[in-house]
Image (cartoon, rainbow, N blue to C red):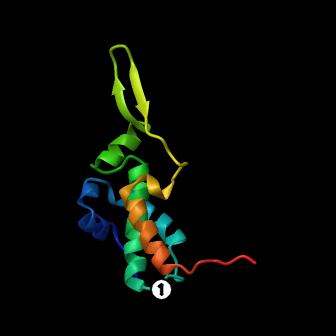
Amino acid sequence: MDSPTPAELKARFPGFAAVADAVVQTALDEAALQVGGDWASQADLRLGRLLLAAHVLTLDGQGSGAEAATAAAGGFRRMRSGALELERIAEAGPGALDSTGYGRRFLELMRRNVPAVTVV
């Protein structure tokens, strides 16, 4: 399977249009390490790599979306200067897939495509 390109990610998710191709490619390479050939659907595998890369980019504060802006601000939902008021967003952990919309969509695809592991 051909890996998705930075141009494909930017076309699918326009919020990353201004992000440098090298940065997007790094996220796509990271996603390729985690989304492999064990997926049932090749189309879902491609979308999974795009979603996971978008999730990684968002957590890195890249892109123009509100989630990326929050990540770039250090995870703060609200900041004030006069009489300093900070409110941090509760996180499930670093890189938690449920912390971005892209990650939540990726989880849905992963559940559909990766066989569950049974431990005896």
Q: Determine crowd level at label 1: few under 14, some 14-19, many 20+ residues with C-alpha closer than 10 A.
A: few
Q: Is residue 25 visible?
A: no
Kindly tell me whether residue 18 is visible in this rendering. yes
- Residue 82 position, x and y percent, is 33, 14
Residue 58, x across and y down, in percent: 38, 52
Q: Quadrant of residue 83?
A: top left
Q: Is residue 98 above or below residue 74?
A: below
Residue ID at (42%, 67%): 106
What residue do we see at 46% from left, 78% from top? 112
Where residue 116 appears, as percent x and y from the top left, is: 59, 78
Q: Which residue is depicted at the point 35% across and 31% down?
A: 78
Q: Position of residue 16 (x, y in %)?
A: 29, 56
Q: Residue furthest front?
A: 120
Q: Along the line of sight, which residue is nearer the eye, 98 or 70?
A: 98
**Image position of 105 with respect to 118: above or below:** above
Give the left or right position of residue 16, taking residue 50 as reference. left
Which residue type does callout 1 highlight?
Ala
The quarter of the picture where residue 41 lies is bottom left
* Quadrant into which the N terminus falls: bottom left
Query: From this viewpoint, which residue is outermost toward the right?
Result: 120
Please name the residue shown 29% across and 70% down the image: 8
In the structure shown, which secondary structural element does the residue marked by tag 1 occupy?
loop
Above or below for 82 versus 120: above
Residue named by callout 1: 40
Residue placed most toward the observer, 54 or 75: 75
Q: How many marks?
A: 1
| 114 left or right, relative to 8 | right
Looking at the rendered image, the quarter that the C terminus falls into is: bottom right
